[in-house]
Amino acid sequence: MADAAVTFLLENVKQLVVEQASLVKGAEGELKQLENDLALMNAFLMEHSDNQDNGPIFMELVKQIREAVYDAEDALDTLTLKAKSKSKPGGIPSLKTLDLAKKVKELRLQLKPAFDRAMSNLKGPAQSVADGSASTLGTSHHNILKKTTLVLRQDNVVGFADQEAILLEYLSEKTEQLDVISIVGMPGLGKTTLAYKIYRDPKIEFEFPVLIWVYVSQEFNVREVFLTILKKFTREDMSGNNNIELTRLVRSHLEKGRFLLFMDDVWTLEDWREIEAALPKNNKLGKVLITSRYERVAKQTNHNREPHKLRFMLFEESWELLQLEAFGKGNTCPKELEGTGQHIAKQCGGVPLAVVVIGGTLSDKQDRREWEKVSKSVSTYVQEDRRTTQIISLSYNKLPHNLKDCFLYLGMFPEDTEISAWKLIRLWIAEGFIQEKPGRSLEEVAEDNLGDLVARNLVMAETTKANGYVKTCRVHDMIREFCQNEASFANKNLFQEVKNTRHGVLDPAITEIVKRRRLCIHYNVMMEFLHNKPKGPRVRSFVCFSKETISLPTEHTESITNAFDLLRVVDATSLKFTKFPAKLTKLIHLRYIALSGNEFKALPEGVSNLWNLQTVKIDTTSRELEVRVDISKMAQLRHLKTKAAISLKEMRLKGKGGENLQTLSRLSAESCTAELFSRILNLRNLGIRGNLNTLVDAPYLGKLELLEKLKLVHDPFSITGEKKELHRFPHLHNLPPNLRMLTLSYTQLAWTQMNILGGLHSLEVLKLKEMAFKGGRWETQSSGFPNLETLHIARTDLEIWTAASDEPFPKLKNLILKNCEGLQEIPFAIGKGKNLQLLEIERVSPTLVQSAQKIASAKIEKEKQEMQGGEVRARRGGFKLKTSPGDASSSSTSN
């Protein structure tokens, strides 16, 4: 939405006034007035942007405001770039000679007409522009198809047999109070279809004398919900009763007897709370089954059972459904169309709605060439269908304004890409999509945003961290296509994917790049794109994607920086640079740099001049990266990340740089100094590589009170080539007091040193990799590790592991053992821990596999006994034993 663009410019103006006072001398008054205008505009747009009655006139006004803001931002940034380029080395740049005050006033006058038009057209709650005639990608709720015609299916229902069986088992369980069962999943997966199938099941009709179906809807109305329920019990008109009376009446009718209430499409926790007030919790014969797109709503309905997450269809199911839709019951696909048809079924990505849409498209096409045409553009056919657009729009329109651009931005990533959450979060911040909240860092706010999108089933969490946060994620092709279409709708100009047309022509054409804001370029067109010498004065982001690394010819080293002067984001790790682009140090608006190059041995001193820079990520095969940057000059720097050992230039005392630094990985042990650590006290994530003996008695680490994640890699070879093993681990008082995650590699410590780590009371995750400890025997002590939740051991010569007590790790949830070929068994006391949820083993001995299976059997049997005894059902998913194919034929799981 426009308010994201406005907010970004507003923050830029504030930063310019405060942190670059010498640059804007003489124009402070005009800049302050511009700041006030933008703040008013931002508040206005935030107030109106979430109104779903906004029509096409409002969308046009938003477009005009956005373009005016973009123009103002470009003009202001161009001025600062010119001023910086005109300044002499070591001198103080100034915009006074360019008459900045006059320029800013002109910018304000350019913004005013667009804002005035919006103000005059959007007065009062009625919103005259809401004419209900928005396009299929607009926000008007008047065009949304009724639920019954959109997704309720009674025929050609495929692939729900196993899902239905699980839910029927839940419905047959005896409980001590009213039981709520929830179904969650991505838009289009068939939540309502499955619920309706159960609703019409004869066994359910026999089991529950009272069956009630209520469509809650996005436009929630608690009176309509209650009146629908009461119609099942009485013909009397209840519409005259107030909400309190209706709540009491519903509860009184449901208090006794068996009933099954279906609440379809519950959107918010607030909606559920209003419904819940009328449900009799003491009626243990009653059942409620809800469907919801929002996992956080589903989890709140029943704390004793995980929501049932609807799976994607298997290929066989997709193919069966496609044939049913294309040819009807009793008919099969002709042999000549089978190969193409199966290829189409795979492209639907296991989403029933996509299969139904494509099946309908194919129903009147019996020619092989027509089917092949569809197979080349499945996602386009799916997205052009009104049902698909509307069902995803329901979720999109419900997003808070601060989440909408974050969501649409995901369309930048290629199909089937596993997206790094770390990268995505830093890109969101650099793009200006994340605003600070009191008591929360930008990274924490962005992490919450990603978690929210996952909970809304718009993003799929591929892997998670030990603390439960998303590590990598994916976006379904159907969702991605929606993001791309919505991002370009009404000229939002959020981003532009550069690709080849079927005729081998660049789309968009090089001449069109001048109008674009953000470019995402895929590897197959990269060389052609650069060869055409693009020029984009408005381009702010250049993001390159490739499944394989491309070696960038030397002549193209400066092509990107020469083409785009106002870049904020350069993410080109899929390109291998032969040398660091020199002009990159002149692009003062850069916030995010991610580059790759085998020859990168140094980060040049010129990077110190990039006062906006927040994130630097360098991929290099060099063992050491010399960072000549003076961090004390870089007040905005938050993350400096590389796998090489960072040889850091000494910091100067002047400047505020380093105070915002959160990630420094991996720092060479030799660069760890008292001066450095006194400057980076807000560090959250630190990696150190080198001869760790230099840190054993140093007090520096102990002063990092905010440090949560520490990774130590011991490189035993000194500069002279002499091997120096780590003789001991630092004492407890020399370690960060609030450390939550610790990873050790190549340290080869004696297992008796584990007692020191046990004293880290805040430690939740401990990863011991690559011979972190050595020795054939480890006896885990009875005290220590009070809050450890994850223990990961990989590559060790450990053979015998014993425990001195019945509960050595009282809060352990996850135990992961990999490449521990010599280890004979796991102490059974660890397996008895009441919190253990996951035991994962890979490349271990046969006797350890047997030990793990013994623990798994005991855990699963205990859970079954608890369930049969009427206790809390399998808390949040149950115990899991995960094995690799080489260790066991299958894994044991408690469901």
Image (spheres, rainbow, N blue to C red):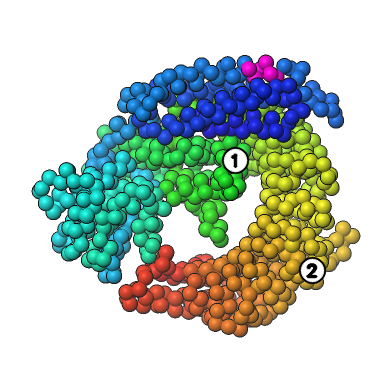
382 on left or right of 161:
right
**Which segment did they paint magenta?**
100-105
Q: Which residue is mark 2?
A: 726
Instruction: Residue 380: give x, y in percent of width and height.
Output: 40, 34
Q: Residues within 10 Å of mark 2 (few under 14, many from 20)?
A: some
**Three-letter amino acid code of the residue under disc 2:** Leu
468 on left or right of 733:
left
Where disc 2 sits, the SS reads: loop
Residue 790, picture quadrant: bottom right
**Three-letter amino acid code of the residue under disc 1:** Ile
873 on left or right of 886:
left
Residue 287, picture quadrant: bottom left
What residue sits 32% from the left and 42% below the top?
Answer: 218
Q: How many marks?
A: 2
Residue 48, picture quadrant: top left
Q: Is residue 248 magenta?
A: no
Query: Magenta region's main secondary structure?
Result: helix
- Frontmost residue, 758 versus 33: 33
What residue sits 15% from the left and 52% below the top?
Answer: 232
Instruction: Residue 361: give x, y in percent of width and height.
Output: 31, 35
Q: Quadrant of the C terminus?
A: bottom left
Q: Which residue is mark 1?
A: 429
Which marked residue is nearer to the observer: mark 2 or mark 1? 1
What residue sits 32% from the left and 74% below the top?
Answer: 870
Q: Residues within 10 Å of mark 1 (few under 14, many from 20)?
A: many
